[in-house]
């Protein structure tokens, strides 16, 4: 369960401003309300944003009742272009580019993101101010034919020879091909419901989605196979929601600190440091997954060739406060033990 939100000074000030605003004949002085929360317009992004606002206002209903926050939907290039791989049109930053432009320009006050879709190097003047408690980080396989028998110990066996997998992730593709080189892959992008509709219509035999998103949308019953991390290593940041703000906005950074999840911060720091050091992009088959067990941070990293013929995993353990160093150190080890041609292939236009 989530820990109770404590009323930080910043939250108290926003609540007080909301009360003044509700009683004032003229607009009150101080920070202008409502505070604008930027989000992609996809159903999952909106659910995540609304869950974030619920979390933020839980301790003080006046923040909700007085309309202290306003949802602000923004269309991104990553959502609009559904016919090309992200690597071909600019990478995962395309899910945040327009949102961060609005944030930098002051049109919104903070922005809510799926952390796995957020670039490792944020634009100048913006910071990751808050990470929320991680949902299940594992990947899920969804089958068109739901009558096949599934062995949890050998989940790939449920796919017929030469099955066509609808997928936009080279990380998922590489790991599947490493186990099942007979599989075929076709590009399948779009929001969760769009992908499921295309699967049902026969566009492919199976597709993969983050279990976290399906659970947040109340669609977990559509899952046929959940891959354990040793069967498919998740993407860095998968299952974590992150909130960005302007670096100079100290009051909002203080406000968001009230709902920061320390474990999510530690594991995401390790995973994002790993990704950044390996120069990870949407064309790079890289996985990173960290968890904390009995006070010890355990990080697993993976790098592979896109065709799955090469796949390397390494592991490191240490103190959560050393998360950034651990991510960098593990990335260095992976790079050292990976053939140079793998990185050359990743940098091809």
Image: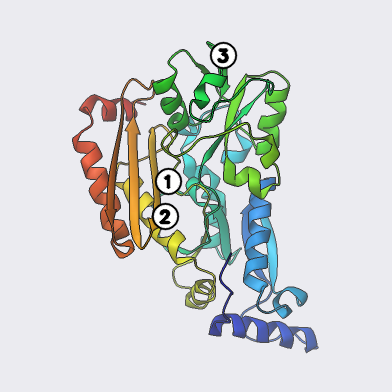
Residue 4 vs 39, above or below: the answer is: below
Q: Dot 3 lies on which element?
A: loop
Q: Which mark is residue 268?
A: 2
Front: mark 2 or 3: 3
Which residue is pictured at 63% across the width and 19% down the height?
Answer: 204
Q: Which mark is residue 160?
A: 3
The answer to which image quadrant residue 8 occupies is bottom right
For residue 135, side relative to residue 297 (left or right): right
Q: Dot 1 lies on which element?
A: loop
Which residue is pictured at 44% across the width and 66% down the height?
Answer: 262
Alpha carbon separation for disc pair 2 and 3: 36 Å
Query: In front: 224, or 103?
Result: 224
Q: Residues within 10 Å of mark 3 (few under 14, many from 20)?
A: few
Q: Can residue 126 be seen here?
A: no
Q: Which residue is mark 1?
A: 236
Q: Residues within 10 Å of mark 1 (few under 14, many from 20)?
A: many
The answer to which image quadrant residue 332 occupies is top left
Q: Dot 2 lies on which element?
A: helix
């Amino acid at each position: 369960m989530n820990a109770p939100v404590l009323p930080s000074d910043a939250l108290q000030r926003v609540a007080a401003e909301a009360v003044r605003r509700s009683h004032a004949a003229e607009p009150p002085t101080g920070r202008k309300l409502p505070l604008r929360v930027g989000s992609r317009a996809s159903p999952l992004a909106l659910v995540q944003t609304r869950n974030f606002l619920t979390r933020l206002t839980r301790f003080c209903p006046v923040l909700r009742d007085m309309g202290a926050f306003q949802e602000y939907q923004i269309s991104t290039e990553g959502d609009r272009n559904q016919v090309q791989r992200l690597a071909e049109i600019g990478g995962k930053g395309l899910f945040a580019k327009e949102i961060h432009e609005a944030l930098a320009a002051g049109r919104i006050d903070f922005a809510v993101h799926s952390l796995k879709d957020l670039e490792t190097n944020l634009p100048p003047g913006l910071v990751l101010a808050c990470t929320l408690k991680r949902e299940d980080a594992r990947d899920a396989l969804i089958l068109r034919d739901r009558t096949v028998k599934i062995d949890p110990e050998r989940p790939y066996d449920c796919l017929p020879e030469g099955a066509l997998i609808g997928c936009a992730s080279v990380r998922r593709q590489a790991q599947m091909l490493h186990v099942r080189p007979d599989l075929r892959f076709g590009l399948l992008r779009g929001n969760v419901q769009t992908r499921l509709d295309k699967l049902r219509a026969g566009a492919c035999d199976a597709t993969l989605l983050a279990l976290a998103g399906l659970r947040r949308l109340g669609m977990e019953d559509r899952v046929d196979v959940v891959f354990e991390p040793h069967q498919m290593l998740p993407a860095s940041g998968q299952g974590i929601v992150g909130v960005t703000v302007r670096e100079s906005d100290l009051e909002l950074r203080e406000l968001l600190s009230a709902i920061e999840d320390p474990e999510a911060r530690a594991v995401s720091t390790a995973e994002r440091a790993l990704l950044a050091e390996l120069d990870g992009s949407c064309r790079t088959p890289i996985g990173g997954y960290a968890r904390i067990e009995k006070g010890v941070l355990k990080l697993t990293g993976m790098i592979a060739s896109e065709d799955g013929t090469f796949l390397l995993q390494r592991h490191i353990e240490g103190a959560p406060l050393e998360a950034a160093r651990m991510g960098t150190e593990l990335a260095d080890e992976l790079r050292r033990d990976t053939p140079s041609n793998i990185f050359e292939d990743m940098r091809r236009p």
